[in-house]
Amino acid sequence: MKQGILPEYDYDVVIIGGGPAGYTAGIYAARAALKTLLIEGEGTVSQITITDIIENYPGIPEGIGGFELMQLFKKQALKFGLEILPKDVNGIKKSSSAQVVWEVTTGGKVFKTLSIIAATGAMWRNLDVPGESEFVGRGVSYCATCDGPFYRNRDVIVVGGGDTAIQEALFLTHFAKKVIVVHRRDRLRAAGMLQERAFAEKKIEFVWNSTVSEITGADFVTGVKVKNVQTGGLSEISADGIFIFVGRLPYTEIFKGLVEMDKTGFIITDENMRTNAAGLFAAGDCRAKLFRQVVTAAGDGANAVHSAELYIDEVKGRTY
Ligand code: NAP
């Protein structure tokens, strides 16, 4: 490396993840004329693309399907010339020859970049009870949009009390005869408006203060065993399907050891999406924060690019 010359690199920014945070970052970075590559997983399904309807994304008063919204994000990013690569990232490290350069590996190919935006999102959390893994695809589901239509005129159980559980319980009433929400407390975590709708929906019943201890069945699910957490009493509920919506876990395995995370593995950032690793930013559901929405993910993506831009300017102005 010659004195005064920035080490070789391919991109100003590599964005990892193809959800709302990643694509918003892609739109902002490409529009800012940063040399940008967005790498989105080959097989991974973004949570938003399996979300039936998004009613609270500003500017779309009639609501929009999750898949449809992502197609619009992508169209907008492509308009600004974003380069997109559908590959899984296998490794990330700092270049051994130049500390300001990160190396991102996908299928043997190495991309050198001055900055990375982690926008890898999160995945559904398992309940971790007997019967859960055995009956996946045979009555256990994590996606009402995908599997709801299989339960026409059947009884289903929804586990959880957050926005996802209640929104999906409402969606399942389009098909199911009865939707039984099993929640571990005596009140819901979900937003007030969702709660009002669920309480007004005749097809939805609630089993409060209860946890599922086992999912039972033979070839297919036939029901669950539940425990009342206050009395310790055990009971059984018959159902043809069980939909589990008990929160999320981050997709951050590839960043382990590179960056500070909380105990669940969410990446810790400051309010400007900067992590404790110089040149590595995080946005959207993969970062530690309170509120995970499409609109907050999009905001994170825009902020991450702004911080990356400031960082890149500073790096390019340094003497090497
Ligand atoms: P969440 O808000 O973390 O809620 C998880 C729910 O599962 C909680 O009710 C929790 O109970 C329960 N739970 C967790 N672990 C459990 C266990 N082991 N056994 C039984 N129950 C368990 O997750 P989420 O509903 O997926 O939402 C995640 C984020 O996405 C939130 O920020 C949410 O606002 C957002 N979101 C928004 C919308 C929307 O605006 N329309 C839709 C979907 C999601 P406790 O309540 O007792 O903790």
Image (cartoon, rainbow, N blue to C red):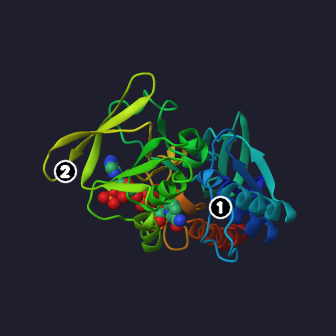
Q: Which dot, 1 or 2, sits closer to the camera? A: 2
Q: In this view, does 222 lie above or below 170?
A: above
| Quadrant of picture, ligand 1 | bottom left
* Extreme residue toward the top, this view: 219
- Asked whether residue 185 appears in the rendered view, the answer is yes
- Asked if marks 1 and 2 touch (Cβ < 8 Å), the reply is no
Q: What residue type is labelled 1?
A: Pro
Q: From mark 1 to mark 2, how far is it between C-alphas?
A: 37 Å
Q: Which of marks 1 and 2 is nearer the N terminus?
A: 1
Q: What residue type is labelled 2?
A: Val
**Residue 229, label in figure:** 2
Q: Is residue 152 above or below residue 36?
A: above
Determine which quarter of the picture holds residue 28.
Answer: bottom right
Q: Residues within 10 Å of mark 2 (few under 14, many from 20)?
A: some
Q: Which of 129 and 102 is in front in this view?
A: 129
Q: Which residue is drawn at 63% across and 45% down?
A: 45
- Name the residue beneath numbered marker 1: 20
Residue 286, given in percent of the width and then of the height, sits at: 52, 56
Residue 100, given in percent of the width and then of the height, sits at: 64, 57
Judging from the image, what secondary structure is the residue with disc 1 in?
helix
Q: Residue at x 79, y 62 (%)?
A: 77
- Asked whether residue 277 appears in the rendered view, the answer is no
Left-right relation of 105 to 37: left
Q: How many labels does the image show?
A: 2
Q: Is mark 2 within 8 Å of ligand 1?
A: no
**Residue 320, label in figure:** none
Judging from the image, what secondary structure is the residue with disc 2 in?
loop
Q: Does the residue labelled 1 lie within 8 Å of ligand 1?
A: no
Residue 197, given in percent of the width and then of the height, sits at: 47, 68
